[in-house]
Image (cartoon, helix red, strand yellow):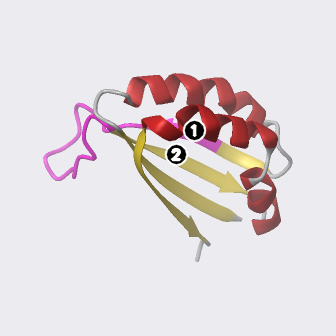
Amino acid sequence: MIHVLAIITAKPGLRKDILSIFELNVPFVKAEDGCIEYGAAVDAGDAPAFQTSWGPDTFVVIEKWESMEALKNHAVASHMAAYGAKTKEMIASRVVHVMSPL
């Protein structure tokens, strides 16, 4: 299994716009072969004091894939290219961590 954390920071005030486009793409991603989990998360408003906040412009995409091959196929899927084209100008930064469980 492959785990992915993608930290997306929107340009100021555009996170909601990106997430609207993201949510429209989720059913296509979940239908991909090898997709186990795919969704976005934001800072919890009622988290304990030890939380390190990402802030109002950032969200994290949490993904699980059956294999590296499935993840690689996801990366080149046509719906991901379309999502990227729609959101490219709204994103300030994107950092992706691909990990294997112990």
Magenta span: 38-57
The local secondary structure at tag 1 comes to: strand
Lower sequence index among marks 2 and 1: 1
Location of mark 2 (residue)? 61
Identity, as a three-letter code, of the amino acid under mark 2: Val
> Is 67 placed left or right of 20 in the picture?
right
**Residue 35 screen position, x and y as percent:** 76, 48
Query: Distance between the Cα atoms at labels 2 and 1?
Result: 6 Å
Residue 48 drawn at (x, y percent) = 18, 44
Residue at 28% from the left image edge and 33% from the top image edge:
12
Residue 55 drawn in magenta: yes
Residue 2, compared with residue 13, is above or below; it is below
- Circles 2 and 1, Cβ within 8 Å, touching? The answer is yes
x%, y% of residue 41? 44, 38
Q: Which residue is mark 1?
A: 39
Task: Give coordinates of residue 85: x percent, y percent.
Answer: 62, 37
Is residue 4 positioned above or below 63 on the image?
below
Can residue 66 be seen in this snapshot? no
Q: Secondary structure at mark 2?
A: strand
